[in-house]
Structures are given as structure tokens and as C-alpha cells.
Image (spheres, rainbow, N blue to C red):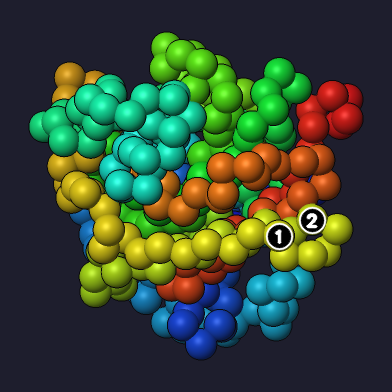
Amino acid sequence: RIISYKLTEERNQLAALTDNDQLYPLPFTSFLEFMNHVENRDQSYLTAVNEMIADSLPIEARLEELDLQLPVRSYEVWACGVTYLKSRDARNLEAKVTTNSYYDKVYDAKRPELFLKSTERRTVGPNDPVFIRSDSNWQIPEPELGLVLNKTGKIIGYVIGNDMSSRDIEGENPLYLPQAKVWKHSCSIGPAIRLAETVANPYDFDITCRIFRNDQLIFEGSANTSQLKRRYEELVSYLMKDNETFDGTVLLTGTCVIPPDEFTLQEGDQIEIEIPEIGVLSNPVRQLAAVK
Ligand code: DO4
Ligand code: MG
């Protein structure tokens, strides 16, 4: 896995995290710098990391002691929608439709739903606050597996993403989707990038979401990426069609865990999303008005 942590006020450090939790510094300040290095040599990412850490010693600090940063500062984060049955059914409920809805249609259609979820400045990393909107009364985190892509659409790695969503705004009218999905700090990514070359079966990731309120666990739900309706390459191919994409673009692959219908996030909640092969992405919830 690749992580980024704050070394000084001015400088981040990229590091490799081995399966036995040893941390090795890599000679880069960002994942994009590392990508540039590997892509220019047309090298394997795993080989590049192994060569770089071969003669170095692990860092003394443990992962929990580091100030983890966004593992990749993507210019754009895209997201897929209604790729799991669970998501289709939740959208139908919030839109109050029972048959032949646009959600039913897109679940079965050849073309998947894709949307621009976030930009570099709107995306936050581990432990940064995610914001809830002031004009919505029904808001949830959407725990999702993210694909880290190079500019040709190759899947370089896997990351955890949170597609914060407003259910009442989208439920009122699907044309409000950008407002139901995009605002300040409405997307978090982290805590590490698991290199694709190290994953035997990416359709077998367990995803667990936990929400804490006043230090009490108030929601826990799990699913597995084997329940995904589509293939990752299929989703990426639609992102790439007639488009320009950039090294480090993240494509979120849709949510499969949704809290109960009566649930809405509140200021002070703590969200944890875990994919054991990647780590745990934790973010506190803040109301933007309360932060200002
Ligand atoms: O249709 C709206 C978005 C759905 C979504 O974000 C998801 O399924 O994860
Ligand atoms: Mg989503």
C-alpha cells in the first residue's frame, strides 16, 4: 500500500506500507510525482516500489502516529451510480417510485451512470472533516471502492472513498443530482492506495461502514464487491469515452452499504469505512455553518 503523511508544515512524504506494517519512505512528496516517474519508464508499480525500498530501512514510527494525508490529490474524482441492487432500491425509495423508474432502467442499461463527483479542492483525506449541507435533512455517507487510474484508464490501485450524499435533494428531483452530490468537503479518499498488482481478486473486497454518535456505534453495515452489477473495466471504459482523463483520477464504483431509511448524519458523527486490504478511512462530520 502507498500512503502520504505530513513530514513538515510544508512537505508531505510518500511511503510504502508492507503487509507486516513496515513503513518505507519513497523518494517522492506525492503519488502523482510517483506516477509520473513510473509512467515515464513504463514500469510496473510494484517493481518500482520494491526496487526503491530494497536497500532502505523502515521508518521507526507506527502508522497510527503519522498525520495521514490524502493518498492522491486527484484533479477529478468521478463516481458511478446504481451499480448495486441496494443502491437501486434506496434511490427508488427516496424518489417514491415503485416501477420502471430511471434507477431501474439505469441498473439494467448497457450504459452505466457516471458523474463528476469531486475536484482536488473539494476532496478531503483521512481524519479531515466531511461536511453536511445546511439545506438537506437526509444525508448519508456512501462507502465505495475507488479505482485509481492512470491517464489511459489503467487501474493502478484501489482506495476507499466516501461519496457523501443528500437523499432528500436527489429524491425531490434526479436533475438535482449535482447538488445532492457535490459541495465543499463532500468527498473523502484514503487512507492508502493498494496497488492493483497486489490484489488477487478485486471482486472480493469486504466493505464495512460504521457510524459513531457520542462515541456509541449507531450504524454498522457490510457488503462485498462481488455484488457489483458491472465490471470495473466496463465502468472505466465509459469514463474514457471521448473524454480527457488524468493520471491519478479516481473512479468511485458505487455504494453497496446504505444506513436505514430513518437515518441522517449529524454534526459530530464519526464515519469509519473499512476495506481490510486497504485500511480504515475515518472522518468526523461537520456542518459547514458550524465550521465558519
Ligand atoms: O443515482 C444517483 C447516485 C447513486 C450513487 O451514488 C451510488 O449508487 O453510489
Ligand atoms: Mg455513490
Taking depth in this image into account, of 169 and 96 the one nearest to the observer is 96
Q: Considering the numbered disc 2 on the image, is that residue within a helix, a strand or a loop?
A: strand
Badge 2 vs badge 1, beta-carbon distance below 8 Å = yes
**Rendered image quadrant of residue 114:** top left
Horizontal side, residue 220 vs residue 208: left or right:
right
Work out how far the residue at label 2 is from the one at label 1, CA to CA, in angstroms. Answer: 6 Å
Taking depth in this image into account, of 225 and 67 the one nearest to the observer is 225
Residue beneath label 1, please?
Answer: 218
Height in image: 243 above or below 52? above
Q: Residue at x 51, y 87 (%)?
A: 20
Taking depth in this image into account, of 216 and 9 the one nearest to the observer is 216
The residue furthest bottom is: 20
Residue beneath label 2, please?
Answer: 213
Q: Residue at x 69, y 28 (%)?
A: 137
Height in image: 23 above or below 203? below
Taking depth in this image into account, of 221 and 228 the one nearest to the observer is 221
Q: Check the picture and name the quadrant holding the N terminus.
A: bottom left
Q: Residue at x 16, y 35 (%)?
A: 108
Q: Check the picture and name the quadrant holding the C terminus.
A: top right
Q: Considering the numbered disc 1 on the image, is that residue within a helix, a strand or a loop?
A: strand
Q: What amino acid is labelled 2 in the image?
A: Arg
The residue furthest left is: 110
Horizontal side, residue 96 vs residue 132: left or right:
left
Mark 2 or mark 1: name the one nearer the start of the chain: 2
